Amino acid sequence: MSQTFKITSAYVASSKVERKASTSWCGSLEIKPTKNAKKVSGNWVDSKYKKASISKLSKGKKAITVRWKKVSTIKGYQIQLATDKKFKKNKKTVTISKQKTTKTTVKKLKAKKKYYVRIRTYKNVKYQGKTIKVYSSWSKVKTVKTK
């Protein structure tokens, strides 16, 4: 913080000096919704949030059933499927808004295709007057082939 001093003739006569502080900031101040949050691909991600882990993947006819271990202290889950390891091709995202849910079936997939699946948790956080989702990091990727 820089400080500037202002001397006026009235104060000089009485040998007093008025001191005025300037509030200039050098650099940028990043405001975050949580202490450890970082913005990744347009979403807030907090690495300290509890992660979910996939316990079982079941294949079906053009469908996949995903089971995971329940995580307390969160709002919901986000599951992502894709046909490539980097989650770029044929990506499908499913959001589960109930914390107690531990199973979902994703339909309308391609037959006899290998899918990569991952899951993460989220919480709703008040941030700058809005409610936003802050996600955990992704779980380990698992694979399954549809029928």
Image: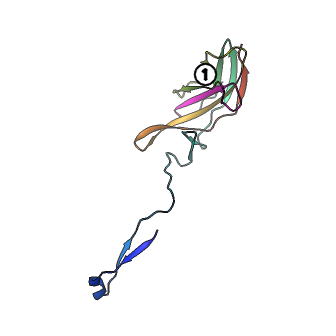
The spot of residue 111 in percent (x, y) is 69, 14
Q: Nearer the viewer, residue 131 or 72?
A: 131
Question: Relative to 145, does residue 44 appear above or below in the rendering?
Answer: below
Image quadrant in which you'd find residue 49: top right
Q: Is residue 43 magenta?
A: no
The spot of residue 34 in percent (x, y) is 51, 46
The spot of residue 68 in percent (x, y) is 64, 26
Q: Residue furthest left?
A: 10
Label 1 SS: strand
Q: Nearer the viewer, residue 36 or 146?
A: 146
At x 26%, y 83%, the residue is 10
Where's the C terminus, which quadrant? top right
- Say whether residue 72 is visible: no
Report the colour scheme.
Answer: rainbow
Question: Relative to 73, does residue 109 appear above or below in the rendering?
Answer: above
Name the residue tied to disc 1. 103
Q: Nearer the viewer, residue 23 or 89?
A: 89
Please report the bounds of the magenta region as a residue range.
Answer: 71-89
Left or right of 143: which side holds 136?
A: left
Q: Is residue 79 magenta?
A: yes
- Say whether residue 62 is visible: yes
Q: Main secondary structure of the magenta part?
A: loop
**How many numbered badges does the structure rendering display?**
1
At x 54%, y 29%, the residue is 99
Left or right of 10: which side holds 109?
A: right
Image quadrant in which you'd find residue 76: top right
